[in-house]
Image: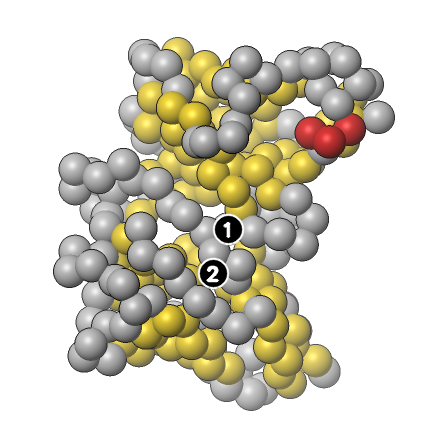
Amino acid sequence: GAVVSQHPSWVICKSGTSVKIECRSLDFQATTMFWYRQFPKQSLMLMATSNEGSKATYEQGVEKDKFLINHASLTLSTLTVTSAHPEDSSFYICSIPEINYGYTFGSGTRLTVV
Amino acid sequence: LAKTTQPISMDSYEGQEVNITCSHNNIATNDYITWYQQFPSQGPRFIIQGYKTKVTNEVASLFIPADRKSSTLSLPRVSLSDTAVYYCLVGDTFGSGNTGKLIFGQGTTLQVKP
């Protein structure tokens, strides 16, 4: 399956600042990527579908102006948490699907907003 | 996507076989059943996928009865390192004209004791 690299692994930022998380497909051209958020002891919650060359599709309840997704190339999707607040502290995970193969997940990014 | 129901938690001891059952009463004809494993602060990892009857790989077996309304993940002779959360998901494979979204249920937290 695809080899996925997610960066950074963890980040601490001050309230009100923005943080960018990268998801890279190292060996596969991904037209679609997914972004998830996971709070402690909870399941993964799908945030949005990232589509190469077009706007992302957000799940109901996810603020598109707060969670900016850019999928400018077939190997990179970025999630920017804008004006982060402590309640945005979470574990963010990207996923890359492959036709008739399955889904490969990134290693995740632990965001802590202080 | 079909909703799945799993036990919230299970305990086992090293060396035992563990069976985790998942209910998916509304599974569609085109849906596959996939299990993922997630360790703390990591992204989910694919374990096994099946459509019907039995599938076995180097780490697990998946048993699916004829009506496909449930499935059982079997982990032979577990070790401490198998302590993780296990997710059962059902859905069509990516690229089959569907959205490709994976919606995670609550998962089963398996605790393996020495």
First in residue order: circle 2 vs circle 1? 1
Q: In this view, does B46 lie above or below A86?
A: below
In the picture as drawn, the residue positioned furthest to the right comes out as: A114
Q: Is residue A58 above or below residue B89?
A: above
Q: Where is residue B82 in the image (x, y as percent from the top left)?
A: 58, 69
In the picture as drawn, the residue positioned furthest to the front comes out as: A61
In the picture as drawn, the residue positioned furthest to the bottom comes out as: B16
Indicate the quadrant where residue B85 lies: bottom right
- The crowding category of the residue bearing disc 2, from other C-alpha atoms within 10 Å (few below 14, some 14 to 19, many at least 20), is many
A20 sits left or right of A36 in the view: right
B103 sits left or right of A99 in the view: right
Q: Which of B97 and B17 is in front in this view?
A: B97
Residue depicted at x 56% and y 88%: B16
Q: Distance between the Cα atoms at labels 2 and 1?
A: 9 Å
Q: Which of B79 and A51 is in front in this view?
A: A51
Residue B56 shows in the view: no
Q: What residue type is labelled 2?
A: Tyr
Residue A47 shows in the view: yes
Figure colour scheme: secondary structure
Residue identifier under label 1: B44
Residue depicted at x 60% and y 72%: B9
Residue identifier under label 2: B87
Chain ID, mark 2:
B
Q: Position of residue A49 (x, y in %)?
A: 39, 29
